[in-house]
Image: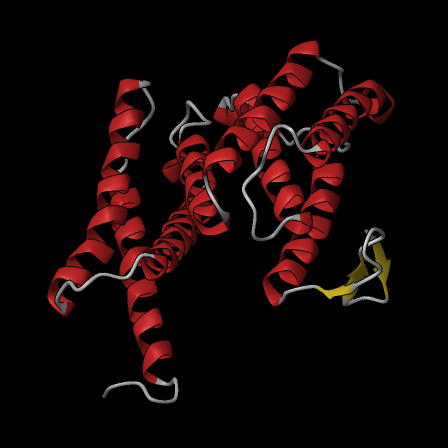
Amino acid sequence: MTAVGKLSIINKKTGVIVKLTHRQKITITVLGLYWIVLIIVTHIPIPQIVYRAHVSDKWLHFLAYINLVFLMWFSVRPDSKASWRSPIVWLIIFVSCAYGGIDEFVQPYFGRTKDLYDFIANTEGALAGFVIITFMMFWPSFLAVSAITIFGVTNLAKADLSKLVPIADAIFHIIAYGCFTLVWIRVMSIYPSRKTALARLFLILGVPIVFLLIVKAGSLLLGRPFATTDLLFAVLGIVAAVIAKYMIDMRQPGAKR
């Protein structure tokens, strides 16, 4: 397929112009911005705060590439699971791994050090992303990648981020768990049920809260710091997301009031 203007692509086999979906346009835009940020952060000196926090950079590389592959696949195949027989899968794996290799190779020219294990972590993240996409469509994949990213970011550092960078830590927990909750609500809408409104609300709140407890239990098992404020900010994000979604739904035409 080749691009036609900004809003559509043309299928070379059929000659049919296919308009990009709204979600696909958003995904492509996010991919572009994400890749720009990725290039910048891997070619600037590592901030001292990273050393002070004792961050696991291998886990960071893994997370970066699992998200990159997720965005790349759903930019070109917005409504499909990945099939390992598809050439596009191997093309995306090649592009992501090639980029990861080139990125490591040129880092010494920017005051960084190249590391084979960083490249391996990149590749593992790319492959893990495709394992998820093989079994799940966009929204369930989004939920799974979000969960892995939240768990990973929460446990990246050995230092107590609630004390080292309290404002950033609070913002992360509010936004991360708020977004996770919104994605979970969207996933629930794909599989409608006849549950009562109260049972549905319990499920909407329950899954993100259980996930939060799993993440924090993982922190304890991994020997990471555990801050009560993290729980409070995460719950705040969950509740805020539910209220925001409810208010938006109430403003839709035909909504029951």
Residue at left offset 28%, top offset 48%:
208
Along the line of sight, the residue nearer the viewer: 220 or 192: 192
Q: Measured along the vertical axis of the image, is residue 210 above or below residue 53?
A: below
Residue extending farthest top: 116
Q: Is residue 161 above or below residue 192?
A: above
Judged left or right of residue 27, residue 18 is: right
x%, y% of residue 175? 42, 54
Q: Is residue 10 left or right of residue 185?
A: right
For the question of whether residue 232 can be seen, the reply is yes
Q: Quadrant of the C terminus?
A: bottom left
Question: In this image, 5 relative to 225: left or right?
Answer: right
Residue nearest the viewer, comparing 185 with 7: 7
Query: Residue at the spot x=38%, y=77% of the render?
Result: 248
Vertical position of residue 34 compared to residue 42: above or below:
below
Colouring of the image: secondary structure
Asked where in the image residue 105 lies, by quadrant, the reply is top right
Locate residue 121 relative to residue 233 in the image: left or right: right
Farthest residue, direction front: 14
Residue 27 spot, x, y in % from top left: 63, 55
The residue at 56%/47% (across/down) is 80
Q: Residue at x 71, y 28 (%)?
A: 90
On the image, the x and y values in percent for residue 141 come to 47, 43
